C-alpha cells in the first residue's frame, strides 16, 4: 500500500470515527411519567392481587370497564399471592374517569366452588380478552358490549407453552348492569386466515374496527363491522382491509394481506383530536420494552413505524419482561393515560416483587 | 421531550453505509499483512498504541481509586497473535475488565455495583520513523450488575440511559503514537456502534432494532471517545505522564439524555518486567458508568494502577 493510499485510508477512518446520529423531523412525541397514585386503582381490592392485559372501554355514565388476562385472586383478605387462585381472565368496573380518584370493583367467575375465569373456559380452551366496543344500533334502546379476544390452549410446557386457537368474541346485552349480571354469548367472527382478532378495537363513522395479528412476527390486519350489526349480535357487513382496499368477507383470498409486520401482540387505537391523527399505542421490542406509538391518517393506515417515548422503570435492567402497553383515551386527569404490565421471564414469576404483575399507569402529556 | 435530539453538526453524519464500507476497507487492510518477510508471533507484547495509561475507565488494568467513593478494576489485555513485518503488522488480542464501584457506601472496598467489559480487537499498525499509526476493529460487550444484596442504586427517571449504558458493540479504532527518546504522545479515537443503534440506521434491520436492543441490553446507540496520553521519559525508572479522556454516550432511547464523561489523570509510571505501576491523581466529571451512568458528578480521587504487559 502506497503512502498516499495509507493517508487516504487514515483520513477516511478518522471521518468514520467522528460519530454519527440521525437528524429527523418526525412529529413530536408525548412526554410521560409513571403515576404512582393512579397505580393504586389496581391495588386496593381485598382479593384481586394482580393481572395483565388491561384493555379498557367506556361503558357510559362515567363507568369504565377493564378487561384483564391471567389474574390472581387471593384466598382471603391477607392478599397473599403465593397461594392465590390463578384464573385466565377477570374484569373490573370503576366509576369516575380519573384513575387517581376512581374506585374499582373487580369481578371473576366461580368454578368448582372457588374463583374461576369471568369468561369461562370451554373444555381445555381458555379466553384471553382483547379490546372491546360498546355498540348501539339505531333501534336499540340500550347499547350492547362486544368483547373480542382469543381462545388459547396449552400444547407445550411452561410459561411459553400456550398457543392461540382462534379468535373469539362475546356479546353482552346489558353492559349497563354490573358484570355479575352479564350473560356473555359467543359471537362467531369471520376467519381471516390465521389472524387473531381483538389486538385493538376502536370505532369510527358507525364502524367498529377490530385489529388482529398473526404469527410470531405479529403481522397486523384490520376488520370493520357496522356498529349496528354488532349491536344486534351479528357480523354482517364485515369488511377487511386487504390489498389496499376494503373488501367484503369472502371476496378475497385468505389470508388477508397485512397492514404491517412486527406489530405488538397487544395495542390500542384511537383518534387524537388534538393532533388530528390516529394513534396506536403499544409496547415496543421484546423483554425490556418501551412504550411507543404509531400514527396514521386513517384507521386502516398506512401506519408509521413505532417510535418509543417512555421506558418503564422495570425496563432499565437486562432480563426484564414488560409488555401489554396500551392507551386509555376514555380516562381523564391527564392528556393521556397509558398502562403496561411488568412481569418476569422466570418460572414461576417472581411474585415477591410487589410491583410486578399489576398494570402500571403512565401519564402522558403533549 | 418530543423534539429531535440536536447534536453539533460534526456529529450529524448518518451515512452509515459509507462507514460500513470503510470498516470493510479497514478489515481488508488488516488482512493485508502477509507477504515476503512476514512473521507470526504468538502472545506478543501489546500494540504500542494501546496505551495502558489511558484515562478511560474501560482501560483493562488493575486499579484502585478512592475519592469520594471507592472504585476498583480487575482487568488485563491479552495479545494473542501478531503477524507482519517490523514496520507493518496486524495484531489481534482480547481484553476483559471487571469494574467495581460503590454507589453510596464510603468504605474502602467497592462492593455495590459491577460493570463487566470484555471484547476483542484487531489492529493494523504501521511505523514510519518516530510515528506509529493504527486502525482497528473491535467487538465488545458491557454488562452492569448489582452485587450481593445491593439493589439498583438510583430509581430510573424518564430521561435516563437504560441498562447502565451497556450492550454489545462493534468498535472502530484509530490511534497515533509519536515517540522520541524523551517524550511519547499517543492519541486514541474509538467509536462504538451498539447493535440497536446500528440496526436502527440500516433499512433492512431497522424494524427489528428495538427487539435487538432489548435482547442485547443496549442502553446506548453509539459512543464516541477520544484520549491523549503524554509521557515524559527522563530515564528508565519513573515516567511522569498526563492523560486526558473524553467520551460522548448517545442513548438508544430518543427521549433519554445524552451522556458525557471527561477525565484528567496525572500519574508517575514505573515500568518493570511485570508491566507498569502508576500512582495517580484523577479529576473526572460527567456521567458515571454502569448503573451509575445517570449520575453526573465531579470527582477528585487518588489511586494506583498496574497494567501487565
Image: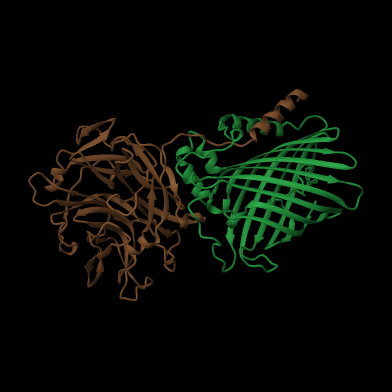
Chain colours: A brown, B green
A229 or B159: nearer the viewer: B159
* Numbered-mark total: 0
Residue A184, quarter of picture: bottom left
Q: In terms of depth relative to the viewer, which is nearer, A147 or A329?
A: A329
At 29% from the left and 53% from the top, the residue drawn is: A331
User: Relative to residue A20, is residue A104 drawn left or right?
Assistant: left
Q: Position of residue A362 (x, y in %)?
A: 39, 54
Q: Report whether A95 appears left or right of A143.
A: right
Q: Residue at x 44, y 54 (%)?
A: A312
Above or below — where is A151 with respect to B19? below
Left or right relative to A226: residue B235 = right
State the residue at coordinates (22%, 73%).
A113
Vertical order, B149 against B157 (above or below) = below
Dividing the picture into quarters, in which one does residue A221 lie?
A: top left
Vertical order, A142 against B150 (above or below):
above
Q: Quadrant of residue B222?
A: top right
State whether residue A96 appears in this view: yes
Question: Relative to A360, is B256 on the left or the right?
Answer: right
Q: Inspect this view and state whether residue A285 appears.
A: no
Q: Percent from the top left, x then y, of residue A27?
A: 41, 37
> Which of the two residues, A308 or A240, is positioned nearer the viewer here?
A308
Q: Residue at x 52, y 43 (%)?
A: B196
Q: Point out residue B110 in the picture as x, y percentages from the top left corner.
A: 66, 65
Q: Residue furthest right?
A: B235
Tell me residue A257's x, y (percent): 31, 35
Amino acid at each position: 500500500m502506497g503512502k498516499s493510499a495509507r493517508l487516504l485510508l487514515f483520513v477516511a477512518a478518522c471521518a468514520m470515527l467522528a460519530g454519527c446520529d440521525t437528524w429527523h423531523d418526525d412529529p413530536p412525541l408525548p412526554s410521560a411519567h409513571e403515576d404512582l397514585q393512579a397505580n393504586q386503582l389496581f391495588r386496593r381490592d381485598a382479593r384481586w392481587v394482580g393481572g395483565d392485559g388491561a384493555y379498557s372501554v367506556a361503558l357510559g355514565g362515567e363507568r369504565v370497564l377493564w378487561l384483564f388476562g391471567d389474574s390472581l385472586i387471593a384466598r382471603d383478605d391477607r392478599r397473599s399471592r403465593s397461594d392465590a387462585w390463578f384464573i385466565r381472565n377477570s374484569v373490573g368496573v370503576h366509576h369516575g374517569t380519573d384513575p387517581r380518584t376512581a374506585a374499582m370493583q373487580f369481578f371473576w367467575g366461580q368454578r368448582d366452588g372457588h374463583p374461576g375465569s369471568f369468561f369461562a373456559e370451554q373444555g381445555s380452551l381458555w379466553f384471553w380478552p382483547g379490546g372491546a366496543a360498546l355498540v348501539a344500533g339505531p333501534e336499540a334502546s340500550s347499547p350492547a358490549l362486544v368483547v373480542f379476544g382469543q381462545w388459547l390452549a396449552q400444547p407445550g410446557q411452561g410459561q411459553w407453552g400456550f398457543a392461540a386457537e382462534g379468535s373469539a368474541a362475546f356479546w353482552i346485552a346489558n353492559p349497563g348492569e354490573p358484570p355479575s349480571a352479564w350473560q356473555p354469548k359467543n359471537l362467531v367472527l369471520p376467519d381471516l386466515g390465521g389472524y387473531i382478532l381483538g389486538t385493538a378495537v376502536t370505532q369510527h363513522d358507525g364502524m367498529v374496527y377490530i385489529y388482529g395479528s398473526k404469527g410470531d412476527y405479529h403481522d397486523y390486519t384490520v376488520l370493520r363491522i357496522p356498529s349496528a350489526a354488532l349491536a344486534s349480535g351479528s357480523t354482517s357487513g364485515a369488511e377487511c382491509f386487504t390489498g389496499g382496499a376494503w373488501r367484503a368477507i369472502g371476496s378475497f383470498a385468505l389470508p388477508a394481506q397485512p397492514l404491517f409486520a412486527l406489530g405488538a401482540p397487544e395495542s390500542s387505537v384511537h383518534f387524537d383530536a388534538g393532533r388530528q391523527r390516529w394513534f396506536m399505542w403499544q409496547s415496543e421490542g421484546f423483554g425490556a420494552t418501551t412504550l411507543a406509538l404509531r400514527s396514521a391518517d386513517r384507521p386502516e393506515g398506512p401506519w408509521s413505524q413505532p417510535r418509543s417515548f417512555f421506558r418503564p422503570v422495570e425496563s432499565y435492567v437486562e432480563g426484564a419482561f414488560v409488555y401489554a402497553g396500551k392507551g386509555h383515551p376514555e380516562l381523564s386527569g391527564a392528556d393521556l393515560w397509558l398502562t403496561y404490565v411488568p412481569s418476569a421471564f422466570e418460572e414461576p414469576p417472581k411474585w415477591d416483587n410487589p410491583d410486578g404483575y399489576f398494570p402500571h399507569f403512565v401519564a402522558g402529556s403533549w | 421531550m418530543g423534539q429531535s435530539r440536536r447534536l453539533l453538526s460534526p456529529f450529524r453524519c448518518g451515512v452509515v453505509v459509507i462507514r460500513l464500507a470503510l470498516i470493510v476497507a479497514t478489515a481488508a487492510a488488516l488482512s493485508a499483512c502477509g507477504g515476503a518477510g512476514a512473521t507470526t508471533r504468538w502472545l506478543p507484547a501489546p500494540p504500542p498504541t494501546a496505551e495502558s495509561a489511558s484515562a478511560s475507565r474501560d482501560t483493562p488494568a488493575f486499579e484502585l481509586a478512592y475519592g469520594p467513593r471507592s472504585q476498583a478494576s480487575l482487568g488485563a489485555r491479552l495479545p494473542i497473535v501478531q503477524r507482519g513485518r517490523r514496520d507493518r503488522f496486524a495484531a489481534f488480542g482480547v481484553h476483559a475488565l471487571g469494574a467495581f464501584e460503590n454507589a453510596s457506601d464510603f468504605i474502602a472496598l467497592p462492593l455495590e455495583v459491577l460493570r463487566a467489559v470484555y471484547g476483542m480487537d484487531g489492529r493494523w499498525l504501521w511505523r514510519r520513523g518516530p510515528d506509529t499509526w493504527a486502525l482497528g476493529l473491535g467487538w465488545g460487550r458491557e454488562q452492569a450488575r448489582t452485587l450481593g444484596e445491593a439493589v439498583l442504586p438510583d430509581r430510573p427517571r424518564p430521561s435516563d440511559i437504560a441498562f447502565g449504558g451497556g450492550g454489545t458493540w462493534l468498535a472502530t479504532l484509530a490511534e497515533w503514537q509519536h515517540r522520541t527518546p524523551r517524550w511519547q504522545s499517543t492519541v486514541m479515537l474509538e467509536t462504538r456502534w451498539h447493535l440497536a443503534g446500528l440496526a436502527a440506521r440500516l433499512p433492512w434491520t431497522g424494524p427489528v432494532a428495538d427487539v435487538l436492543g432489548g435482547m442485547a441490553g443496549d442502553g446506548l446507540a453509539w459512543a464516541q471517545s477520544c484520549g491523549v496520553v503524554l509521557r515524559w521519559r527522563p530515564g528508565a525508572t519513573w515516567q511522569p505522564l498526563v492523560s486526558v479522556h473524553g467520551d460522548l454516550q448517545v442513548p438508544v432511547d430518543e427521549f433519554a439524555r445524552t451522556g458525557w464523561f471527561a477525565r484528567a489523570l496525572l500519574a508517575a509510571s514505573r515500568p518493570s518486567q511485570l508491566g507498569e505501576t502508576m500512582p495517580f491523581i484523577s479529576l473526572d466529571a460527567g456521567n458515571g458508568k454502569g448503573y451509575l451512568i445517570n449520575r453526573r458528578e465531579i470527582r477528585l480521587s487518588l489511586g494506583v494502577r498496574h497494567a501487565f504487559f
